[in-house]
Amino acid sequence: MASAINRRQFIKACAVLTLGFTTPISFAQGHRDPRMVVLILRGGMDGLAAVPAYGDPAYRSGRGKLALGTPDTVDGVIDLDGFFGLNPVFENLAQMYAGREALLFQAIAPPYAKRSHFYAQDVLETGLTNPAGSASGWLYRALQGLSEGRDPEKYGYSLGAGIPRIVQGALPVGAWAPDRLPDPDEDTLQRLMALYEQDSYLGPKVRAGFNADEMINAMGGKLRGGNNLTTVAKAAARFLTRDDGPRVAVMDSGGWDTHAWQGTTKGRLANRFRELDTVLAGLKQDMGSVWDQTAVVIITEFGRTVAVNGTSGTDHGVGGAAFLLGGAVNGGRVHSDWPGLAKEKLYEGRDLKPTLDMRALFAGVLHQHMGLDRGFIEEQVFPGYRDQVSGLIRAG
Protein backbone atom coordinates (compact mmCIF):
# COMPACT_ATOMS: atom_id res chain seq x y z
CA MET A 1 0.00 0.00 0.00
CA ALA A 2 2.80 2.41 0.88
CA SER A 3 4.49 1.98 -2.48
CA ALA A 4 1.23 2.83 -4.31
CA ILE A 5 0.84 6.00 -2.25
CA ASN A 6 4.43 7.02 -2.87
CA ARG A 7 4.02 6.46 -6.60
CA ARG A 8 0.94 8.65 -6.70
CA GLN A 9 2.66 11.38 -4.70
CA PHE A 10 5.61 11.22 -7.08
CA ILE A 11 3.36 11.54 -10.14
CA LYS A 12 1.55 14.51 -8.65
CA ALA A 13 4.83 16.16 -7.67
CA CYS A 14 6.04 15.88 -11.25
CA ALA A 15 2.82 17.50 -12.47
CA VAL A 16 3.18 20.36 -9.98
CA LEU A 17 6.75 21.00 -11.05
CA THR A 18 5.72 20.98 -14.68
CA LEU A 19 2.95 23.51 -14.09
CA GLY A 20 5.13 25.67 -11.88
CA PHE A 21 7.85 26.22 -14.48
CA THR A 22 5.79 26.31 -17.64
CA THR A 23 6.13 29.39 -19.80
CA PRO A 24 2.73 30.41 -21.17
CA ILE A 25 2.41 29.32 -24.79
CA SER A 26 -0.43 30.01 -27.19
CA PHE A 27 -1.38 26.84 -29.03
CA ALA A 28 -4.01 28.52 -31.18
CA GLN A 29 -3.74 27.87 -34.90
CA GLY A 30 -5.85 30.54 -36.52
CA HIS A 31 -9.32 30.23 -35.02
CA ARG A 32 -8.90 26.55 -34.18
CA ASP A 33 -7.45 25.33 -30.92
CA PRO A 34 -8.70 21.73 -30.70
CA ARG A 35 -8.81 19.61 -27.56
CA MET A 36 -9.03 15.84 -27.40
CA VAL A 37 -10.04 13.67 -24.45
CA VAL A 38 -9.71 9.87 -24.45
CA LEU A 39 -11.65 7.94 -21.80
CA ILE A 40 -11.01 4.18 -21.53
CA LEU A 41 -13.71 2.07 -19.87
CA ARG A 42 -11.74 -0.92 -18.63
CA GLY A 43 -13.34 -4.32 -18.27
CA GLY A 44 -15.43 -4.49 -21.43
CA MET A 45 -18.51 -2.28 -21.47
CA ASP A 46 -21.65 -3.99 -22.74
CA GLY A 47 -22.31 -2.04 -25.93
CA LEU A 48 -25.71 -3.65 -26.50
CA ALA A 49 -26.79 -2.43 -23.07
CA ALA A 50 -25.62 1.10 -23.83
CA VAL A 51 -26.84 1.33 -27.44
CA PRO A 52 -29.43 -1.46 -27.89
CA ALA A 53 -30.30 -2.48 -31.44
CA TYR A 54 -33.96 -2.87 -30.50
CA GLY A 55 -34.99 -2.87 -34.16
CA ASP A 56 -33.09 -6.06 -34.94
CA PRO A 57 -35.58 -8.96 -35.18
CA ALA A 58 -33.27 -11.17 -33.10
CA TYR A 59 -32.59 -8.58 -30.41
CA ARG A 60 -35.13 -9.69 -27.81
CA SER A 61 -34.59 -13.41 -28.18
CA GLY A 62 -30.82 -12.96 -28.16
CA ARG A 63 -30.67 -10.70 -25.11
CA GLY A 64 -33.34 -12.44 -23.09
CA LYS A 65 -33.98 -10.75 -19.75
CA LEU A 66 -31.36 -8.09 -20.52
CA ALA A 67 -33.39 -6.80 -23.48
CA LEU A 68 -34.76 -3.27 -23.23
CA GLY A 69 -38.17 -2.21 -24.47
CA THR A 70 -41.06 -4.36 -25.64
CA PRO A 71 -41.55 -6.15 -28.98
CA ASP A 72 -43.84 -3.52 -30.50
CA THR A 73 -42.71 -0.28 -28.90
CA VAL A 74 -39.53 1.53 -27.94
CA ASP A 75 -40.62 1.69 -24.32
CA GLY A 76 -37.54 1.36 -22.13
CA VAL A 77 -35.10 2.92 -24.60
CA ILE A 78 -34.43 6.41 -25.85
CA ASP A 79 -35.10 6.05 -29.55
CA LEU A 80 -32.30 7.34 -31.77
CA ASP A 81 -33.13 6.44 -35.34
CA GLY A 82 -35.90 3.85 -35.35
CA PHE A 83 -33.43 0.97 -35.07
CA PHE A 84 -30.89 1.87 -32.41
CA GLY A 85 -31.76 3.23 -29.01
CA LEU A 86 -29.94 4.55 -25.97
CA ASN A 87 -30.18 3.17 -22.46
CA PRO A 88 -32.62 5.55 -20.74
CA VAL A 89 -30.24 6.34 -17.88
CA PHE A 90 -28.12 8.29 -20.40
CA GLU A 91 -30.22 11.43 -20.08
CA ASN A 92 -27.37 13.89 -20.65
CA LEU A 93 -25.85 11.89 -23.48
CA ALA A 94 -29.29 11.81 -25.13
CA GLN A 95 -29.40 15.62 -24.98
CA MET A 96 -25.98 15.80 -26.61
CA TYR A 97 -27.17 13.41 -29.31
CA ALA A 98 -30.26 15.55 -29.92
CA GLY A 99 -27.99 18.61 -30.10
CA ARG A 100 -25.81 16.81 -32.68
CA GLU A 101 -22.89 16.72 -30.25
CA ALA A 102 -22.71 12.94 -29.88
CA LEU A 103 -21.86 10.32 -32.48
CA LEU A 104 -22.38 6.69 -31.45
CA PHE A 105 -20.66 3.64 -32.91
CA GLN A 106 -21.93 0.06 -32.90
CA ALA A 107 -20.21 -3.17 -33.94
CA ILE A 108 -16.78 -1.61 -33.41
CA ALA A 109 -13.71 -3.22 -31.84
CA PRO A 110 -9.91 -3.09 -31.79
CA PRO A 111 -8.22 -5.57 -34.16
CA TYR A 112 -8.37 -8.41 -31.63
CA ALA A 113 -10.98 -11.12 -31.03
CA LYS A 114 -9.72 -13.48 -28.32
CA ARG A 115 -11.51 -11.93 -25.31
CA SER A 116 -8.54 -11.51 -22.96
CA HIS A 117 -8.69 -8.26 -20.98
CA PHE A 118 -4.95 -7.76 -20.89
CA TYR A 119 -4.20 -8.52 -24.52
CA ALA A 120 -7.27 -6.63 -25.74
CA GLN A 121 -6.24 -3.55 -23.78
CA ASP A 122 -2.70 -3.82 -25.17
CA VAL A 123 -4.09 -3.85 -28.72
CA LEU A 124 -6.47 -1.01 -27.92
CA GLU A 125 -3.73 1.18 -26.47
CA THR A 126 -0.80 0.41 -28.78
CA GLY A 127 -2.86 0.43 -31.96
CA LEU A 128 -0.86 -2.61 -33.10
CA THR A 129 -2.22 -6.06 -33.87
CA ASN A 130 0.84 -7.58 -32.19
CA PRO A 131 1.71 -5.40 -29.19
CA ALA A 132 4.38 -7.73 -27.77
CA GLY A 133 7.39 -6.13 -26.18
CA SER A 134 7.56 -2.52 -25.08
CA ALA A 135 5.66 -0.89 -27.93
CA SER A 136 4.63 2.72 -27.30
CA GLY A 137 1.01 3.78 -27.18
CA TRP A 138 -0.68 5.12 -30.30
CA LEU A 139 -1.60 8.39 -28.64
CA TYR A 140 1.99 8.84 -27.47
CA ARG A 141 3.16 8.45 -31.06
CA ALA A 142 0.48 10.89 -32.20
CA LEU A 143 1.71 13.45 -29.65
CA GLN A 144 5.10 13.46 -31.34
CA GLY A 145 3.43 14.84 -34.46
CA LEU A 146 0.81 16.98 -32.74
CA SER A 147 3.20 18.85 -30.48
CA GLU A 148 5.25 20.14 -33.45
CA GLY A 149 8.34 21.04 -31.47
CA ARG A 150 6.50 21.75 -28.22
CA ASP A 151 7.21 19.61 -25.19
CA PRO A 152 4.94 16.52 -25.39
CA GLU A 153 4.93 16.53 -21.57
CA LYS A 154 3.05 19.81 -21.67
CA TYR A 155 0.86 18.99 -24.66
CA GLY A 156 -0.55 15.67 -23.45
CA TYR A 157 -1.61 14.70 -19.93
CA SER A 158 -2.56 11.48 -18.19
CA LEU A 159 -5.01 12.04 -15.37
CA GLY A 160 -5.67 9.42 -12.73
CA ALA A 161 -3.94 6.85 -10.57
CA GLY A 162 -1.50 5.62 -13.22
CA ILE A 163 -0.16 6.35 -16.69
CA PRO A 164 -1.93 4.09 -19.22
CA ARG A 165 -0.01 2.42 -22.00
CA ILE A 166 -1.78 4.53 -24.62
CA VAL A 167 0.49 7.48 -23.71
CA GLN A 168 3.60 5.56 -22.66
CA GLY A 169 6.76 5.94 -24.70
CA ALA A 170 10.41 6.91 -24.62
CA LEU A 171 9.68 10.33 -23.10
CA PRO A 172 7.27 11.17 -20.28
CA VAL A 173 3.94 12.88 -20.75
CA GLY A 174 2.42 15.14 -18.13
CA ALA A 175 0.66 13.43 -15.25
CA TRP A 176 -1.73 14.35 -12.47
CA ALA A 177 -3.33 12.16 -9.82
CA PRO A 178 -5.75 12.95 -6.98
CA ASP A 179 -4.42 12.92 -3.42
CA ARG A 180 -6.70 10.10 -2.30
CA LEU A 181 -6.22 6.49 -3.32
CA PRO A 182 -8.88 5.34 -5.82
CA ASP A 183 -11.91 3.72 -4.23
CA PRO A 184 -12.46 0.02 -4.88
CA ASP A 185 -15.13 -0.63 -7.49
CA GLU A 186 -17.91 -3.20 -7.43
CA ASP A 187 -16.20 -5.76 -9.66
CA THR A 188 -14.52 -7.76 -6.87
CA LEU A 189 -17.77 -7.99 -4.92
CA GLN A 190 -19.67 -9.14 -7.98
CA ARG A 191 -17.10 -11.86 -8.69
CA LEU A 192 -17.46 -13.15 -5.13
CA MET A 193 -21.23 -13.26 -5.51
CA ALA A 194 -20.90 -15.14 -8.82
CA LEU A 195 -18.50 -17.65 -7.24
CA TYR A 196 -21.06 -18.67 -4.61
CA GLU A 197 -24.20 -18.23 -6.68
CA GLN A 198 -24.78 -21.97 -7.21
CA ASP A 199 -24.28 -22.79 -3.52
CA SER A 200 -27.78 -23.12 -2.02
CA TYR A 201 -26.54 -22.35 1.49
CA LEU A 202 -23.74 -19.81 1.05
CA GLY A 203 -25.10 -18.13 -2.09
CA PRO A 204 -27.95 -16.21 -0.45
CA LYS A 205 -25.76 -15.27 2.53
CA VAL A 206 -22.95 -13.94 0.35
CA ARG A 207 -25.42 -12.03 -1.80
CA ALA A 208 -27.04 -10.46 1.24
CA GLY A 209 -23.72 -9.59 2.84
CA PHE A 210 -22.02 -8.22 -0.25
CA ASN A 211 -24.89 -6.64 -2.13
CA ALA A 212 -23.11 -3.86 -3.97
CA ASP A 213 -25.89 -1.31 -3.87
CA GLU A 214 -26.49 -1.81 -0.15
CA MET A 215 -22.81 -1.47 0.63
CA ILE A 216 -22.52 1.62 -1.55
CA ASN A 217 -25.36 3.26 0.34
CA ALA A 218 -23.96 2.21 3.72
CA MET A 219 -20.55 3.65 2.88
CA GLY A 220 -21.85 6.91 1.52
CA GLY A 221 -21.11 6.09 -2.10
CA LYS A 222 -17.42 5.38 -1.50
CA LEU A 223 -17.37 2.27 -3.67
CA ARG A 224 -18.56 3.99 -6.79
CA GLY A 225 -15.74 4.36 -9.26
CA GLY A 226 -17.60 7.23 -10.92
CA ASN A 227 -16.86 9.44 -7.91
CA ASN A 228 -13.15 9.19 -8.57
CA LEU A 229 -13.76 9.71 -12.29
CA THR A 230 -15.68 12.89 -11.47
CA THR A 231 -12.62 14.29 -9.70
CA VAL A 232 -10.33 13.34 -12.57
CA ALA A 233 -12.69 14.77 -15.22
CA LYS A 234 -12.90 18.08 -13.39
CA ALA A 235 -9.11 18.20 -13.27
CA ALA A 236 -8.98 17.44 -17.01
CA ALA A 237 -11.25 20.40 -17.71
CA ARG A 238 -9.08 22.69 -15.61
CA PHE A 239 -5.96 21.64 -17.50
CA LEU A 240 -7.51 21.74 -20.98
CA THR A 241 -9.12 25.17 -20.60
CA ARG A 242 -5.88 26.90 -19.64
CA ASP A 243 -4.32 29.01 -22.38
CA ASP A 244 -0.95 27.42 -21.61
CA GLY A 245 -2.33 23.99 -20.73
CA PRO A 246 -2.30 20.65 -22.54
CA ARG A 247 -4.56 19.94 -25.47
CA VAL A 248 -4.83 16.16 -25.07
CA ALA A 249 -5.98 14.34 -21.92
CA VAL A 250 -6.35 10.63 -21.11
CA MET A 251 -8.48 9.15 -18.32
CA ASP A 252 -9.71 5.67 -17.51
CA SER A 253 -12.48 4.05 -15.51
CA GLY A 254 -12.50 0.50 -14.17
CA GLY A 255 -15.24 -1.88 -13.12
CA TRP A 256 -17.01 -2.52 -16.45
CA ASP A 257 -16.61 -6.32 -16.32
CA THR A 258 -20.24 -7.28 -15.71
CA HIS A 259 -20.18 -11.05 -15.30
CA ALA A 260 -22.94 -11.08 -12.67
CA TRP A 261 -26.17 -9.22 -11.84
CA GLN A 262 -25.77 -6.77 -14.67
CA GLY A 263 -29.32 -5.40 -14.79
CA THR A 264 -30.93 -3.22 -17.47
CA THR A 265 -32.22 0.20 -16.43
CA LYS A 266 -31.59 -0.59 -12.77
CA GLY A 267 -28.75 -2.44 -11.13
CA ARG A 268 -25.03 -2.54 -11.36
CA LEU A 269 -24.45 -1.55 -14.97
CA ALA A 270 -27.18 1.10 -14.97
CA ASN A 271 -25.44 2.69 -11.98
CA ARG A 272 -22.18 2.85 -13.93
CA PHE A 273 -23.96 4.32 -16.96
CA ARG A 274 -25.63 6.92 -14.78
CA GLU A 275 -22.33 7.91 -13.20
CA LEU A 276 -20.67 8.14 -16.60
CA ASP A 277 -23.56 10.25 -17.90
CA THR A 278 -23.16 12.65 -14.98
CA VAL A 279 -19.41 12.89 -15.54
CA LEU A 280 -19.91 13.73 -19.22
CA ALA A 281 -22.43 16.45 -18.42
CA GLY A 282 -20.03 17.89 -15.85
CA LEU A 283 -17.15 17.81 -18.32
CA LYS A 284 -19.20 19.73 -20.87
CA GLN A 285 -20.14 22.34 -18.31
CA ASP A 286 -16.61 22.68 -16.94
CA MET A 287 -15.10 23.05 -20.42
CA GLY A 288 -17.21 26.15 -21.01
CA SER A 289 -16.66 27.81 -24.38
CA VAL A 290 -13.77 25.41 -25.06
CA TRP A 291 -16.34 22.63 -25.46
CA ASP A 292 -16.89 23.83 -29.03
CA GLN A 293 -13.26 22.88 -29.77
CA THR A 294 -13.43 19.53 -27.99
CA ALA A 295 -13.80 15.89 -29.05
CA VAL A 296 -14.18 13.19 -26.38
CA VAL A 297 -13.49 9.59 -27.44
CA ILE A 298 -14.96 6.92 -25.12
CA ILE A 299 -13.75 3.39 -25.77
CA THR A 300 -13.51 -0.07 -24.21
CA GLU A 301 -11.39 -3.11 -25.02
CA PHE A 302 -14.25 -5.34 -26.21
CA GLY A 303 -17.99 -5.85 -26.02
CA ARG A 304 -19.83 -8.65 -24.28
CA THR A 305 -21.80 -11.74 -25.21
CA VAL A 306 -25.23 -11.20 -26.71
CA ALA A 307 -26.80 -13.83 -24.44
CA VAL A 308 -27.14 -13.68 -20.67
CA ASN A 309 -24.95 -16.04 -18.65
CA GLY A 310 -25.93 -18.17 -15.66
CA THR A 311 -25.33 -15.39 -13.14
CA SER A 312 -27.52 -12.79 -14.84
CA GLY A 313 -24.56 -11.06 -16.44
CA THR A 314 -22.62 -11.23 -19.69
CA ASP A 315 -19.22 -12.65 -20.54
CA HIS A 316 -16.32 -11.30 -22.58
CA GLY A 317 -17.29 -10.67 -26.18
CA VAL A 318 -15.89 -8.97 -29.27
CA GLY A 319 -17.95 -6.30 -31.06
CA GLY A 320 -19.11 -3.39 -28.93
CA ALA A 321 -19.91 0.29 -28.84
CA ALA A 322 -17.93 3.54 -28.65
CA PHE A 323 -18.89 7.19 -28.22
CA LEU A 324 -17.53 10.36 -29.77
CA LEU A 325 -18.93 13.56 -28.32
CA GLY A 326 -18.14 17.24 -28.01
CA GLY A 327 -19.01 20.60 -29.46
CA ALA A 328 -16.70 19.92 -32.42
CA VAL A 329 -18.37 16.61 -33.30
CA ASN A 330 -20.67 16.09 -36.27
CA GLY A 331 -23.12 14.08 -34.21
CA GLY A 332 -26.77 13.16 -33.98
CA ARG A 333 -26.39 9.73 -35.62
CA VAL A 334 -25.29 6.14 -35.08
CA HIS A 335 -22.43 4.97 -37.27
CA SER A 336 -22.69 1.23 -37.90
CA ASP A 337 -22.39 -1.36 -40.63
CA TRP A 338 -24.77 -3.53 -38.64
CA PRO A 339 -24.05 -7.29 -38.99
CA GLY A 340 -27.23 -8.53 -37.27
CA LEU A 341 -27.96 -10.52 -34.13
CA ALA A 342 -29.34 -13.72 -35.63
CA LYS A 343 -27.40 -16.72 -34.35
CA GLU A 344 -25.77 -17.45 -37.70
CA LYS A 345 -24.56 -13.85 -37.98
CA LEU A 346 -22.80 -13.71 -34.64
CA TYR A 347 -19.05 -14.03 -34.26
CA GLU A 348 -18.41 -17.66 -33.29
CA GLY A 349 -22.14 -17.97 -32.62
CA ARG A 350 -22.06 -15.82 -29.47
CA ASP A 351 -20.74 -12.29 -30.00
CA LEU A 352 -21.68 -9.22 -31.99
CA LYS A 353 -19.46 -9.34 -35.07
CA PRO A 354 -17.23 -6.24 -35.38
CA THR A 355 -17.49 -4.49 -38.73
CA LEU A 356 -15.40 -1.39 -37.91
CA ASP A 357 -11.79 -1.32 -36.76
CA MET A 358 -11.51 1.11 -33.85
CA ARG A 359 -8.31 2.52 -35.35
CA ALA A 360 -10.43 4.08 -38.10
CA LEU A 361 -12.18 6.15 -35.43
CA PHE A 362 -8.90 7.17 -33.79
CA ALA A 363 -7.29 8.08 -37.12
CA GLY A 364 -10.31 10.14 -38.13
CA VAL A 365 -10.27 12.19 -34.93
CA LEU A 366 -6.52 12.74 -35.11
CA HIS A 367 -6.68 13.92 -38.72
CA GLN A 368 -10.03 15.71 -38.97
CA HIS A 369 -10.09 17.28 -35.51
CA MET A 370 -6.51 17.56 -34.28
CA GLY A 371 -5.10 18.32 -37.74
CA LEU A 372 -2.46 15.59 -37.71
CA ASP A 373 -1.03 14.81 -41.13
CA ARG A 374 -2.62 11.72 -42.62
CA GLY A 375 0.71 10.40 -43.84
CA PHE A 376 2.13 10.67 -40.34
CA ILE A 377 -0.85 8.75 -38.98
CA GLU A 378 -0.46 5.96 -41.50
CA GLU A 379 3.31 5.68 -41.11
CA GLN A 380 3.93 6.44 -37.44
CA VAL A 381 0.73 6.22 -35.41
CA PHE A 382 -0.89 3.14 -36.99
CA PRO A 383 1.85 1.71 -39.23
CA GLY A 384 0.38 0.00 -42.26
CA TYR A 385 -3.21 0.92 -41.45
CA ARG A 386 -4.83 3.42 -43.82
CA ASP A 387 -8.54 3.62 -43.08
CA GLN A 388 -10.40 6.34 -41.21
CA VAL A 389 -14.04 7.21 -40.63
CA SER A 390 -14.97 10.36 -42.53
CA GLY A 391 -17.31 13.14 -41.47
CA LEU A 392 -16.58 12.97 -37.74
CA ILE A 393 -16.09 16.70 -37.18
CA ARG A 394 -18.32 19.66 -37.94
CA ALA A 395 -17.33 21.67 -40.99
CA GLY A 396 -15.74 25.03 -40.20
Image (spheres, grey):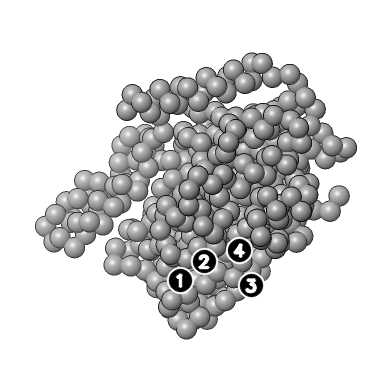
User: Nearer the viewer's eye, disc 3 or disc 4?
Assistant: 4
Residue occupied by mark 2: 319
Mark 4 or 1, nearer chain start? 1
Q: Using the numbered discs, state the Cα–Cα distance from disc 4 to disc 2 in whole angstroms.
A: 10 Å
Q: Which mark is residue 351?
A: 1
Q: Using the numbered discs, state the Cα–Cα distance from disc 2 to disc 3 in whole angstroms.
A: 12 Å
Mark 4 or 2, nearer chain start? 2
Q: Residue furthest right?
A: 30
Position of 240 compared to 205: left or right?
A: right
Q: Horizontal and vertical percent for residue 394?
A: 80, 53
Question: Which amino acid, mark 4?
Answer: Asp
Position of 167 compared to 66: left or right?
A: right
Question: Which amino acid, mark 1?
Answer: Asp
Q: Which mark is residue 357?
A: 4
Residue occupied by mark 3: 337
Q: Horizontal and vertical percent for residue 276?
A: 52, 46
Mark 1 or 3, nearer chain start? 3
Q: Secondary structure at mark 3?
A: loop
Q: Secondary structure at mark 1?
A: loop
Q: Using the numbered discs, state the Cα–Cα distance from disc 2 to disc 1 in whole angstroms.
A: 7 Å
Viewer-closest of 364 and 92? 364
